[in-house]
Image (tube, grey):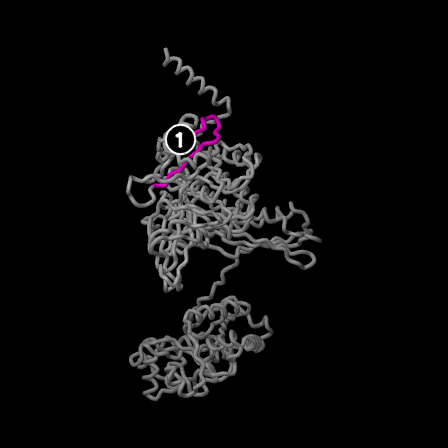
Amino acid sequence: MDTAKANIIAQLKKDILPLQGFKTTLNTLALDGIPAAIKNAFPNAAFPLGAVHELIADSLEDAAATSGFISAILASIMKNAGSCIWINRSQSVFPPALKSFGISPDNIIFIYLKKEKEILWAMEEALKCTGLSAVIGEVQDLSFNASRRLQLAIEQSQVTGFIVRRNPRSLNTTASLARWKITSLPGELPAGMPGVGFPRWNVELLKVRNGKPGSWQIEFVGGRLKHVPTMTAIHPQQQKKTG
Amino acid sequence: MQKRFISIWFRYLKTDWWIRRRPMLHDKPFVLASPDHGRMVITAANGLAQKEGIDIGMVVADARALIPSLEVLDDQPETLARLLNGLAEWCIRYTPAVAIDPPDGLLLDVTGCAHLWGGEKSYIREIRKRFKHFGYDINMALTDAIGAAWAIARFSPNDRIIENGQQHMALLSLPPASLRIEASATERLEKLGLSQISQLISMPRSALRRRFGAQILQRLDQALGYEEERINPVQPIEPYQERLPCLESIVTATGIEIALQRLLDALCHRLQQEQKGLRTAVFKGYRMDGKIEKIEIGTNRPCCNSKHLFKLFEIKIESIEPASGIELFTLEASKVEDLSTVQEQLWGNKMDLDNVELSELLDRIGGKIGAHNIHRYVPAEHYWPERSFKEASSLNETIQTAWKVDRRRPLQLLSRPERIEVTAPIPDYPPMLFRYAGKLHKIMKADGPERIEAEWWLHDGQHRDYYCVEDEDGYRYWLFRSGHYDAAKSYQWFIHGFFS
């Protein structure tokens, strides 16, 4: 009886999704570098490509963690020789470091622009180009109109866009599909071992269209993201900050 | 029609060219020299130096003994060909068929050209005047045969015009070296006392062939005009340029767009036929009031797609000020390269840098906000972090060395390391505390040190000992100490990057 009920609910959920404006995109990439826990937060348990992801970074350190998370996802998107455009204010990404995430840095084109308006324009143009795997842009503020323009550009080309918002003045509503916040967590090492351990982040999905927001501890191990399911180990200070 | 040829001989071709470039050399003896078997051998000497007895083939040290103040310049052999080619192309104003005659001459086929300058005398005078104005010391001869022109230009003291069929007489008094024969044959002729062509011209041909080879007979025939000789005229590259004169002056943007479209179509058609693509192009509008309005574009890879090029120009059309109207448009491709063949793909669009769409996108972005903002990096063979990558020259540049992944590197790097204050316990241990941007960070975990030596052949400075440290919030930093830890405190701590 329960299974029949569950089936009906699943079917109804599926029917509701298109009514809510969800378009199933042809997600041909398996993206096996992304843990299932994150994927489950999205409809159909698939990490949405061909959409704008918005990431909030409040400090330089957070920005580094955010670019690390993006690079890890980018590595699975660009797996078969894709190219990508990364638009910044100035040179801050250290290209050789991208290689350790599994991305060939020479496949990335960096564009440095001073004005936010120009960054958004360049991003929109880039998102219209079907020959790209992903576009990453760093801005401070993103108005609803600007985000909608980006989303409209994407709907034609199905390129994935990441927009990093550095120290945003206000967390206004945008047309982005998801809003993330990535912060660093202390790495965990087996007792008595020297070093700093693998990078570990607290990945928060603050907003997601048609999905379930959530928060995960993710570790980047051996070229892929790994979910660390310990919820109790959150550092007290960290909790204060994000809570 | 009787063929007529001019041979121009440049007495001091290379040195005259140097004087043109550096006028202060004009009244100094100087020579050009190039290394040969560990010595510097003179390859050209100017008139003043030759007067002092310096000759080509002399060693520079010997020449310095003659003139201590002698100036010696490096001879670049490739300039000669370029220079002769340039002169030949310039001479096309006198006749369409101009050939270079290395090492120091030009050959002009002037058949039916001289009357345009009012006869052969004024023709020759005109050429001489122009070359003299440039500073070249030349000697010329105008005859029926190339061989005779060559000989007379080089072996008679001044310019001569040999009337139709008279070259026989003119050649008689010249030495056999003027026949363009091998040096060994000339030497043998001299040894036998045959110092003038008149002495061997009357000899039986079979005897000449037996003693000096068949070449001498052929050269003799060519000099006398019995045997025809061909020249290989230089072909100047036609510039990739299109013009569109307008019947009525254009003042509207639509008009300019139509003109641009037409010019682009014509130019791209030509480029496509020659399998070329343009890298830079200039579109000019000549205004009624004499001013020239121009816009320029550049592309990332050779392109002959008029639609795409039009888009690039379109962004800039608004900067054209037609004022009273534009009467002539020109479009010139200032940099043209061979088109790289692109294979059409049947299924699955490959997403890499060879993508035409991507290069067109970059052209558009570069056209609007400046191509200097677009960067692509390839690895460089350096350990110093700032130098471990370099700008790629183009989209097609392939990486020569692999990216290094053996050491952990921060994803965010400060463009310039910033000074920090640290508390470090013992030498060569990571610091315990550091203060950056007004905030105190307590270090919980650390990795290192990794020593990176300063590349002394590029710059001097102290080595860096890098540590990857993690503070109590889990943020990771890349710190380094510049120099050894010593009591004299010559070292300094810096922050260089942020790990993700």
Q: Is residue A45 left or right of residue B326?
A: left
Where A151 falls versus B201 (above or below)? above
Q: Nearer the viewer, residue B315 or B156?
A: B315
Q: Which residues are magenta?
A: A198-216
Any part of residue B238 in sight: yes
Amino acid beneath label 1: Ile
The spot of residue B446 in percent (x, y) is 35, 47
Q: Which residue is mark 1?
A: A38
Q: Nearer the viewer, residue A177 or B34?
A: A177
Number of marks? 1
Where B351 falls versus B453 (above or below)? above
For residue A214: magenta?
yes
Q: Label 1 neighbourhood size at 10 Å, few (<14), some (14-19), many (20+)? A: many
Q: Nearer the viewer, residue A121 or A188?
A: A188
The spot of residue B172 in percent (x, y) is 43, 84
For residue A190: magenta?
no
Where B234 falls versus B185 (above or below)? above
Quarter of the figure that contains the C terminus of chain B: top left
Q: Is residue B289 left or right of residue B90?
A: right
